[in-house]
């Protein structure tokens, strides 16, 4: 969730692009993490229905087990059984039906489950919740971050024909340009370069446009890293789709790009006359696909 100036941020908030200045307004004991720890402690103090039932019958159960043990020991003696076999049967019965085993089987497991879930980022509000999974028939989960790690990674690199770059050169330039960015896709590109042991040159003139990509100067070369709809032509996308299809993988095609001059509109009106001759010319902005089409028409293709 994007934050604006004056919004409240929580402990652990991730900074995206740019700098973030925050002011501490609460005591550390009132932080989100501290409240989570407190809720886990309160959940550990709650009692599940099974535990309440065991505590209610625990005393009666203990008395009943003692009486039953005496009966298992005494009745055979009355009918002429020897002492040692009767004592062994009575002790075996006492161990198997021990009230301690019954109590220990109902109290520690929910506490251990709550603590274990808390260490893995799952907050259980009470011990009752830990008994309910046995009654669940259907579970709905958010895939990203639950069933999946939610961390993208680079799986393959394919330079376009005619660029004169191999996979290592392409990854080096892309990772160097993305290095200052905090975007998760940028982190994936940088991580892939580090896994291959590539040296990343320093990037200057870095700029980031949310939703489009980044631009930087790498060793005197202007490098642009962005979405396929921003940098690739329809023919490039078609070749990429065929290449991935041959590997049994899916390629999400970007929206079709209109030809140069079609489907474009200018935002802003230029003033009359040339600059410096009594008129002022305002900058004209075009939608992303139109900028891409004009750049290709002028022969200034991005990397």
Image (spheres, grey):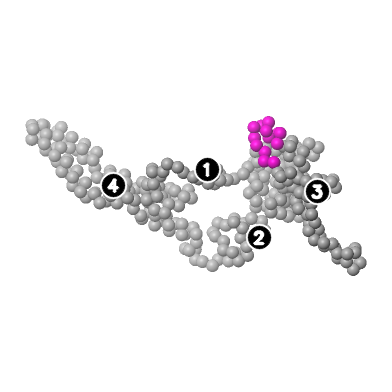
- The residue identified by callout 2 is 19
- Badge 1 marks a residue whose secondary structure is loop
- Badge 4 marks a residue whose secondary structure is helix
Q: Which comes sooner in the sequence, label 2 or label 1?
A: 2
Q: Closer to the observer: label 4 or label 3?
A: 3
Report x, y in % for residue 196: 67, 39
- The residue identified by callout 1 is 147
Q: Which comes sooner in the sequence, label 4 or label 1?
A: 4
Check if residue 252 falls in the magenta segment: yes
- Badge 3 marks a residue whose secondary structure is loop
Q: Which residues are magenta?
A: 241-253
What quarter of the picture does the C terminus occupy?
top right
Residue 278 visible in the snapshot: yes
Is 22 situated left or right of 60 in this image?
Answer: right
Residue 169 visible in the snapshot: no
- The residue identified by callout 4 is 103
Is 201 situated left or right of 107 in this image?
Answer: right
């Amino acid at each position: 969730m994007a934050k604006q100036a004056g919004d409240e941020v929580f402990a652990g908030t991730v900074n995206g692009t740019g700098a973030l200045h925050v002011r501490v307004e609460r005591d550390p004991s009132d932080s989100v993490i501290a409240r989570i720890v407190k809720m886990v402690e309160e959940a550990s103090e709650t009692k599940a229905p099974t535990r309440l039932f065991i505590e209610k019958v625990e005393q009666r159960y203990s008395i009943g087990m003692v009486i039953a043990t005496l009966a298992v020991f005494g009745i055979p003696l009355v009918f002429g059984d020897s002492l040692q076999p009767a004592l062994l049967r009575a002790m075996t019965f006492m161990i198997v039906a021990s009230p301690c085993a019954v109590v220990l089987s109902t109290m520690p497991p929910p506490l251990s489950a709550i603590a274990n879930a808390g260490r893995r980022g799952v907050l259980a509000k009470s011990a009752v919740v830990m008994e309910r999974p046995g009654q669940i028939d259907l579970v709905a989960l958010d895939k990203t971050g639950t069933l999946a790690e939610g961390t993208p990674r680079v799986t393959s690199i394919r330079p376009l024909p005619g660029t004169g770059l191999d996979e290592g050169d392409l990854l080096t330039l892309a990772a160097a340009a993305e290095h200052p960015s905090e975007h998760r896709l940028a982190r994936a590109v940088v991580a892939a370069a580090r896994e291959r042991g590539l040296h990343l040159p320093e990037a200057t003139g870095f700029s980031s446009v949310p939703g489009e990509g980044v631009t930087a100067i790498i060793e005197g070369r202007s490098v642009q890293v962005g979405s396929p709809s921003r940098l690739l032509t329809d023919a490039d996308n078609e070749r990429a789709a065929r290449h991935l299809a041959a590997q049994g993988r899916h390629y999400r095609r970007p929206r079709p790009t209109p030809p140069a001059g079609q489907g474009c509109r200018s935002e802003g009106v230029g003033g009359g006359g040339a600059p410096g001759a009594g008129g002022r010319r305002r900058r004209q902005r075009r939608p992303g696909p139109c900028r891409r089409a004009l750049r290709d028409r002028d022969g200034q293709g991005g990397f």
